[in-house]
Image (cartoon, rainbow, N blue to C red):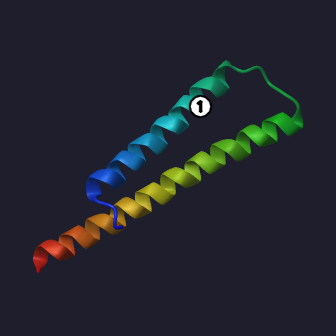
Amino acid sequence: MDQTVEQAQAALAAANAAYQSELERDCERSEGSGAQERRREEHLQALRDDIARCERELEKVRVAATKAGAH
């Protein structure tokens, strides 16, 4: 099933909220071991990757919606 623009926007908003929430939690944590810091950074990178994926998906559905509207 194809995603709608609204669904893609909601997914992007959720991804951004998850990233922001994790940044806020991370600021409250004390510094951990090298391994802990590496896991935190890997988790933040995964969240950033999810945002980028959602942005690409939103662009894709916007282009598809524009093309569908032009027909």
Image vertical order of residue 61 relative to residue 36, above or below: below
| Residue at x 78% of width, y 41% of height | 39
Q: Position of residue 37 (x, y in %)?
A: 80, 36
Q: Residue furthest front?
A: 1
In the rendered view, does 40 fall on the left or right side of 64?
A: right
Instruction: Determine which quarter of the picture holds residue 59.
Output: bottom left
Q: Position of residue 70 (x, y in %)?
A: 12, 77
| Residue at x 80% of width, y 42% of height | 38
In the rendered view, does 33 fall on the left or right side of 39?
A: right
Q: Which residue is mark 1?
A: 23
| Residue at x 11% of width, y 80% of height | 71
Q: Residue furthest bottom?
A: 71
In the rendered view, does 42 fall on the left or right side of 12?
A: right
Q: 35 and 71: which one is in front?
A: 71
Image vertical order of residue 22 relative to residue 49, above or below: above
Q: What amino acid is found at the position of numbered circle 1 in the picture?
A: Leu
Binning the other alpha carbons within 10 Å of mark 1 as few (below 14), some (14 to 19) or many (20 upward) gives few
Q: Position of residue 42 (x, y in %)?
A: 72, 46
Q: How many marks?
A: 1
Instruction: Determine which quarter of the picture holds residue 33.
Output: top right
Quadrant of the frame with the N terminus: bottom left
| Residue at x 66% of width, y 27% of height | 26
Q: Position of residue 55 (x, y in %)?
A: 42, 57
Q: Secondary structure at mark 1?
A: helix
